[in-house]
Every structure is written in C-alpha cells, then in structure tokens.
Image: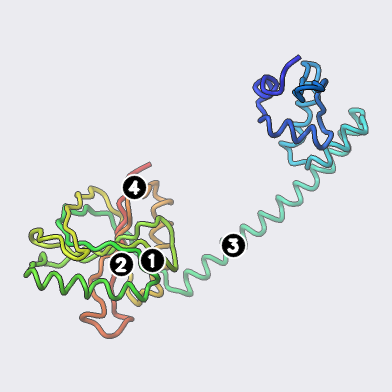
Amino acid sequence: MFRIGEFSKISRLTVKTLRHYDEIGLLKPKHVDDLSGYRYYTADQLPRLQKIIALKQIGLPLSDIAVMLADDLNTEEMIIRLQHKRTDLLANLASQQAQLQQLVTYLTTLRKENGMNYHVTIKDLPEVTVASMRKVIANYDEFNSLYPKMGELMIKQNLKCVNPGYCFTLYHDGEYKAENIDVEICESVVEAGKDEDGMTFKKIPAVPTAACVIHKGPYTTIGQAYAALTQWIEENGYEVIDLMRENYLDGIWNQPDPSQWITEIQAPVRKK
C-alpha cells in the first residue's frame, strides 16, 4: 500500500486533489487507519484514477465523471456519452470561431473610425542625466502639480536643461491604475544638481532599441497610441524589456489647444 503522499507522487496529483476525490466519493482510499487517519492506496486503483484524469482533461466535470464511473458503464455506453460531449465541444468551437471573426471585423471598423493610423519607428535612446521626482499620487489630477514643483526647484538651483529638451514620465506600476499611481517625472539636464525636497538626480542608461509612436491630441485619448504600439510590438516579434516613457514634445506649457499636443511613447524592446 501507498500512503497518500507516495500515491500523490505516483499519480502526479496533489494531496489536496486526492483528498477532494475522497470527499466526493470519486476515489476512496483502499484503507484509512483508525488511529492516525492516514489514507492508503493500492496500485490497482491507478487504472480508475487514469480514467478520472483522462475524462477531466477532455472537459467533463467531476460530477459527470462520478456518474459515469459509478454506473460502471461498459465501453459502448461510455463511447455514446463521449460522442455527445464531442458534439457539444464542436458546437462551442463553431460559436467561438464566429465570435472571433466578428471581433476581428469590429476591431478593423473601430480602427478606421478612430483614425488609428499610428506609424511605429525603431530608434535608440541616448544615456541621459535627469532631474527626477517619484511619488505615489492619488490620481491624475495630482500629477499636474509635480512638474511645476520640480520646475521651481530646478530654477532655484539654476539648472540647465539639454537642448532640445527631453522631458518624460515613467509609470512604475506595470499596469494602468486610476488611483495611487507610482509615477516618476524626468527632465534631462546638462549636469546633476543637489538632491532636494523630493527631487533627485541620476543617469538613465542608453536604450539601443526602442519602438516609438507619436500621439497628437489630448492625454485622454493617448490609450489609442499605447494600443497601436503594443499591437505592433507583438506582431513584429519584439518584447518590452523596460518601462515605457511618455516624452512630451508639445503640451499645455506652449500650446493651449489640447488637440495640438504632441507626445511620443517610447518602449525599450528587444527581439524575442
């Protein structure tokens, strides 16, 4: 006999799964020690267990498997029931294929309607020394107060920005968040200054390969550019290897009309 841990290794099922099968009557141990409560199994239970595993892998719920095994069906009866399952699977597959085609068509329509004519380019990003300020902000409204605050500190230290300017934002959460957002604003400078009041200085290494796309318009629609860039990266065999950057070329500081704002999204990538 095998204790449950040994039987778990032989069957490649977890102890938790075997205990569950025991609880629902699907596979009872051959013997349970009255004193210790240990469950013991035998090798002749493996064929039944393999049936359970095979039927589960083809999508039968445990309740149906229990009925089939409890009824002690002969081969012909089991074949009939499995043929019914096959018919159900084929019907579901046909339905999902139809939904997939509808989805592809709808996506194509949406892209045309929304003018998602984004052109992705590949370029390198040089090493830069930046003044940065990283903070977890409550929401995007609070984000608008970070750059003015860092700007005041930079003026106080008489720091010089590189020409042309390189101002960008990094989002450290790894996912979109509407609140409690871990954000870091960066302004490229000629040389580092003194860390002060949340403003720090560091070098950001060069990026040999970045996939980049230009978004023209307000930040409320920038998600379209992210979607287009992400799709291009996947379709062209790349993967993102570091935080994406939002590089602000034109914005509220020099262009009052949001439809004329220009932002470049830069994604460090490499070939898969």
Q: Nearer the viewer, residue 216 or 53?
A: 53
Choose the circle earlier in sequence order: 3 or 4. Answer: 3
Query: Residue 161: image x %, image y %?
Result: 11, 66
Looking at the rendered structure, the kind of residue marked 4 is Ile
Answer above or below: position of 105 versus 206.
below
Cα distance, mark 4 to mark 2? 20 Å
> Marks 1 and 2: CB-CB under 8 Å?
yes
Looking at the rendered structure, the kind of residue marked 1 is Ala
Choose the circle earlier in sequence order: 1 or 3. Answer: 3
- Residue found 36% across the figure and 66% down from its top: 118
For the residues carrying marks 4 and 1, which lies nearer the camera in this image? 4
Cα distance, mark 3 to mark 4? 29 Å
The secondary structure type at the circle numbered 1 is helix
Residue 103 — which label?
3
Kindly identify which residue carries mark 2. Answer: 214
Kindly identify which residue carries mark 4. Answer: 241
Image quarter of the N terminus: top right
For the residues carrying marks 4 and 2, which lies nearer the camera in this image? 4
Choose the circle earlier in sequence order: 4 or 2. Answer: 2
Residue 55 — which label?
none
